[in-house]
Image (tube, rainbow, N blue to C red):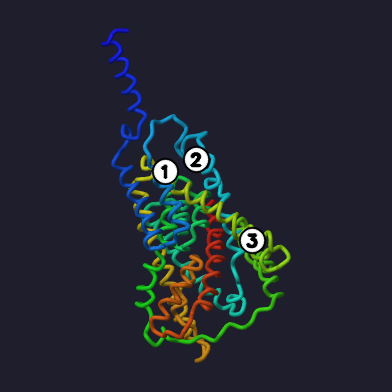
């Protein structure tokens, strides 16, 4: 082979090699999504906003937006790729029930059992779900798409993934990223709304200490809770069944190993998988659309309305409660499903106005009620939209 042919041969192969590199397939959309992923990682590390969620999701966004030549079976949407197999658990709604199993195993429902009326706050906070559902319909989304978007208001990432996998799989990436983003931003979004809706007098209301809950009550709660909720909304069984099962593993005290596995290694593994694959699903070529951006706007509206609903409902309840039995409206924000971050926000804002008034235990009641409420709301939407 003479030198001319050799150089031509090398040039052709170098050119072919270049077509397979990320540089040759790079678009401005990939750059935008990579920057979004870096922002998620920054918020997780520097600001400690839900690092267990934002680091897997942020890194997943980076993974999903490394440009590649089509057909190599490496992309999350390419059949046969490793990421595609891992994403199967998201597409088919497998991961969310496993997350709920772990949540049930780590959740203490004592605050809710000792003061059952707090469950009403969790129900009121679901107003954001149905408000965003109505607004999405008004803006031209289909009923199924609107239902999947509305669930963002529950501030529950696994529930959002579960519902969108059934109703609008094509929107799942945008819905999941939106839901997890607003979950992480609970400490930023909710306090201004809480201060806006309450007076100084209301913020320093002291609530009676919760009564001691017996072991029998704790054991009966998941059993009765399962029967009551799933007989009304059977379509919520995958989430509610696993939530209450995990709680029974914890409260029975005879299955400690199983409870420890559910709330430890199992939920950690599933969180890694769900975060990484949801992040990777934001591949710029399929994710970066005007619809996705609009979903973020509707998600913010949904979450804000949910916070409004919870706080205003507590204020309304106080109109019918005697002095000494009134509830501090600052716990109304915790009716969303972001456990335990929403309850911590109630505590932090409350301490700003009274350094000795600890609201965390009281706020955990509506907070865990919000977990149940969002799953019930998802079941209701599934029942008439699927």
| Image coordinates for residue 343, horizontal then vertical, percent | 48, 72
The answer to whether mark 1 and mark 2 are in CB contact below 8 A is: yes
Q: Determine the secondary structure under disc 3.
A: helix
| Cα–Cα span, label 1 and label 2 | 10 Å
Q: Which residue is mark 3?
A: 260
What residue appears at the point 42 percent right and 81 percent down from the top-left corner? 351
231 in relation to 142, above or below: below
Residue underneath mark 2: 83
Tell me the number on the disc at residue 166.
Answer: none
Labels 1 and 2: the sequence-earlier one: 1
Q: Position of residue 307 (x, y in %)?
A: 42, 70
Nearer to us of marks 2 and 3 is 3
Estimate the spatial distance between the alpha carbons at disc 2 and disc 3, rounded to whole Å: 28 Å
Residue annotated with mark 1:
63
Residue at image position (37%, 63%) is 47
State whether residue 149 is above or below residue 4. Answer: below
Q: CA distance from mark 1 to mark 3?
A: 31 Å
State which quadrant residue 303 falls in. bottom left
Q: Nearer the viewer, residue 15 or 296?
A: 15
Q: Secondary structure at mark 2?
A: helix
Across and down, in percent, residue 135 comes to 39, 60
| 10 Å crowding of disc 3: few (<14), some (14-19), many (20+) | some
**Residue at the limit of the structure toward the bottom, as seen here:** 323
Judging depth in this view, the residue of 71 and 293 nearest the camera is 71
Answer with mark 2 or mark 3, whichever residue precedes in sequence: 2
Total number of numbered discs in the rendering: 3
């Amino acid at each position: 082979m003479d030198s001319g042919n050799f150089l031509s041969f090398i040039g052709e192969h170098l050119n072919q090699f270049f077509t397979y590199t990320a540089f040759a397939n790079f678009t401005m959309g990939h750059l935008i999504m990579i920057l979004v992923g870096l922002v998620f990682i920054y918020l997780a590390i520097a600001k400690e906003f839900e690092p267990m969620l934002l680091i897997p999701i942020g890194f997943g966004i980076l993974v999903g937006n490394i440009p590649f030549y089509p057909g190599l079976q490496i992309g999350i949407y390419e059949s046969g790729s490793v990421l595609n197999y891992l994403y199967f658990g998201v597409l088919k709604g497998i991961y969310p029930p496993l997350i709920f199993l772990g949540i049930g195993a780590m959740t203490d429902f004592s605050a809710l059992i000792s003061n059952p009326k707090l469950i009403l706050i969790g129900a009121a906070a679901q107003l954001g779900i149905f408000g965003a559902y109505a607004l999405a319909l008004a803006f031209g989304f289909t009923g199924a798409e609107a239902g999947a978007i509305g669930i963002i208001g529950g501030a529950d990432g696994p529930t959002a993934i579960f519902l969108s996998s059934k109703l609008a799989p094509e929107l799942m990436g945008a819905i999941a990223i939106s839901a997890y983003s607003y979950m992480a931003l609970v400490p930023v979004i909710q306090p201004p709304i809480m201060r806006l809706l309450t007076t100084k007098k209301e913020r320093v209301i002291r609530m009676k200490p919760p009564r001691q809950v017996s072991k029998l009550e704790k054991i009966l709660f998941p059993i009765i809770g399962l029967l009551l909720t799933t007989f009304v909304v059977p379509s919520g069984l995958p989430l509610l069944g696993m939530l209450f099962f995990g709680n029974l593993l914890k409260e029975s005290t005879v299955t400690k190993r199983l409870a420890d596995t559910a709330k430890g290694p199992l939920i950690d593994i599933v969180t890694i998988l769900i975060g990484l694959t949801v992040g990777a699903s934001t591949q710029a070529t399929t994710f970066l659309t005007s619809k996705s951006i609009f979903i973020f706007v509707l998600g913010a509206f949904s979450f804000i309305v949910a916070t409004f609903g919870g706080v205003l409902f507590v204020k309304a309840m106080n109109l019918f409660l005697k002095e000494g039995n009134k509830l501090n409206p600052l716990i109304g924000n915790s009716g969303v499903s972001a456990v335990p971050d929403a309850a911590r926000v109630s505590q932090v804002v409350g301490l700003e106005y009274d350094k000795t008034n600890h609201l965390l235990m009281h706020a955990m009641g509506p907070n865990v009620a919000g977990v149940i409420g969002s799953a019930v709301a998802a079941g209701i939407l599934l029942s008439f939209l699927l």
